[in-house]
Image (spheres, grey):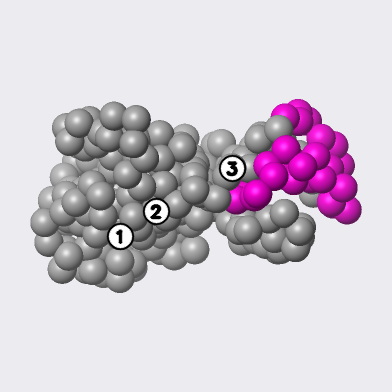
């Protein structure tokens, strides 16, 4: 997973991940932990001993929690196969993976899938028919939780087409990114939720993510950068900064 995996660690954003790679050759959490133990991180400009200790602690917590999570690479085949099956349902207009999978985090707690459908209740009722479903944990007209035969838990949200972009934005996250966007909307006398961006009772945007970002005065932000680590400010002010960050 390379540099993207480093972004799972608190205190490491795109620029610091690039600095760790360029100066120390770090591309894995294990290498990051080793560099911290050896005191090499503190020697880098902009890091220091205190941040090195914070990074070491964060990596230790992350690695300790590893068995309860699924590596991204291990989840890909099952995730993509399920989405392809959902897309093939007659009432489905679109289906996409969201959550930490879409943000390309190193490990996953579960899978999030957002589906746009003309008849959400009907599509939701069909999800248990997928051949790799071991159990339907919970079922509703718009939200269904499945457990696959490989142990992965999957939350599927089925929404109307006009809400698809808003739901993708909301369920992709991260939490910090979503909160920052909602705050930005409020400063513009608007409300943002999983159903759309609203000015009073009028939906301003919602069918696409790009439409919501544009209505908030922002350029598109790649899902891998949605961690509330400066990407919103970059999208609003200096596209060159965002382009530099996207290199990792």
Question: Does residue 178 appear anywhere in the picture?
Answer: no
For the view shown, which residue lies furthest in the front direction? 202
Name the residue rendered at 22%, 54% in the picture.
218
Q: Is residue 107 left or right of residue 185?
A: right
Q: Is residue 159 left or right of residue 196?
A: right
Say which element carries label 2: helix
Question: Does residue 65 appear anywhere in the picture?
Answer: yes
Magenta residue span: 111-140
Residue tagged by mark 1?
Answer: 220
Pick whichever, 88 or 155, lies toward us: 88
Q: Residues within 10 Å of mark 2 (few under 14, many from 20)?
A: many
Residue tagged by mark 3?
Answer: 159
Q: Position of residue 221 (x, y in %)?
A: 31, 57
Q: Is residue 155 left or right of residue 134?
A: left
Nearer to us: label 1 or label 2: 2
Sequence-first tag of 1 and 2: 2
Does the magenta-highlighted stretch encompass residue 52? no
Name the residue rendered at 34%, 36% in the picture.
202
Position above or below: 130 against 158: below
Q: Are marks 1 and 2 in contact (CB under 8 Å)?
A: yes
Q: CA distance from mark 1 to mark 2?
A: 8 Å
Residue tagged by mark 2?
Answer: 209
**In terms of image quadrants, where is residue 65?**
top right
**In terms of image quadrants, where is residue 60?**
top left
Sequence-first tag of 3 and 2: 3
Quadrant in which the C terminus appears: bottom left
Name the residue rendered at 44%, 65% in the picture.
2
């Amino acid at each position: 997973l390379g540099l993207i995996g480093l972004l799972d660690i608190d205190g490491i954003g795109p620029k610091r991940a690039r600095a760790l790679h360029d100066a120390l050759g770090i591309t894995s959490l294990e290498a990051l932990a080793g560099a911290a133990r050896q005191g090499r991180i503190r020697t880098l400009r902009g890091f220091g001993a205190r941040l090195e200790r914070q990074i070491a602690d964060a990596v230790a917590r992350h690695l300790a929690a590893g068995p309860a999570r699924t590596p991204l690479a291990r989840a890909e085949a099952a995730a993509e196969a399920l989405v392809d099956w959902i897309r093939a349902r007659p009432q489905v207009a679109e289906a996409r993976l969201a959550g930490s999978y879409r943000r390309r985090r190193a490990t996953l707690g579960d899978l999030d899938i957002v589906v746009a459908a003309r008849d959400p209740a009907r599509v939701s009722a069909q999800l248990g028919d997928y051949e790799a479903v071991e159990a339907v944990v919970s079922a509703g007209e718009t939200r269904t939780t499945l457990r696959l035969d490989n142990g992965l838990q999957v939350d599927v949200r089925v929404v109307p087409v006009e809400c698809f972009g808003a739901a993708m934005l909301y369920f992709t996250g991260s939490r910090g990114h979503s909160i920052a966007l909602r705050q930005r909307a409020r400063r513009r006398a608007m409300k943002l939720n999983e159903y759309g961006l609203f000015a009073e009772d009028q939906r301003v945007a919602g069918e696409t993510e790009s439409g919501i970002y544009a209505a908030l005065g922002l350029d598109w932000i790649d899902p891998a950068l949605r961690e509330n680590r400066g990407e919103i400010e970059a999208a609003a002010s200096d596209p060159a900064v965002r382009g530099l960050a996207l290199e990792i």
